[in-house]
Image (spheres, rainbow, N blue to C red):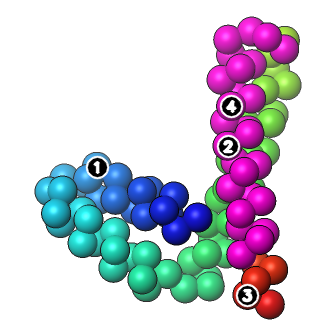
Amino acid sequence: MATALFSIFYYEHRHDGNSRPEALRKAQVKLRELTKADFAEISKQVSAARQEARSKRKEFREGLEEYLKWDGEYRKYVGVTIRIEGIKKLSR
């Protein structure tokens, strides 16, 4: 989970125009300073993305390219949700 979050933070900073070393440093700092509130917000965003992918997937017949695209997105967010739930259980 930490690796996934780090990657997201890194690419956000790269997208903002930071150099690779600067994006790396900023991503490290952001990951270190992640709070429970931040984690809760990320969890909420993942849940919304999972629901959107599930809804979009239903718009297409199974086996079509669009269906497979949204099915992949849905499965990705299901995996992240499982990891988030595991972390929540550990922190109780």
Q: Which three-letter amino acid code belongs to the residue tagged 3? A: Ser
Circle 1: is it few (<14), some (14-19), or many (20+) Cα within 10 Å?
few
Q: Which mark is residue 72?
A: 4
Q: Which residues are magenta?
A: 62-87
Residue found at x 52% / y 68%: 2
Q: Which mark is residue 15?
A: 1
Callout 3 secondary element: loop
Say which of 7 and 66 sits in front: 7
Circle 4: is it few (<14), some (14-19), or many (20+) Cα within 10 Å?
some
Q: Which residue is mark 2?
A: 76
Query: Distance from label 4 to label 1 (Cα)?
Result: 24 Å
Query: Distance from label 2 to label 3 (Cα)?
Result: 23 Å
Circle 3: is it few (<14), some (14-19), or many (20+) Cα within 10 Å?
few
Evaluate whether residue 73 shows in this view: yes
Mark 1 or mark 3, whichever is nearer to me: 3
Q: Earlier in the sequence, mark 2 or mark 3?
A: 2
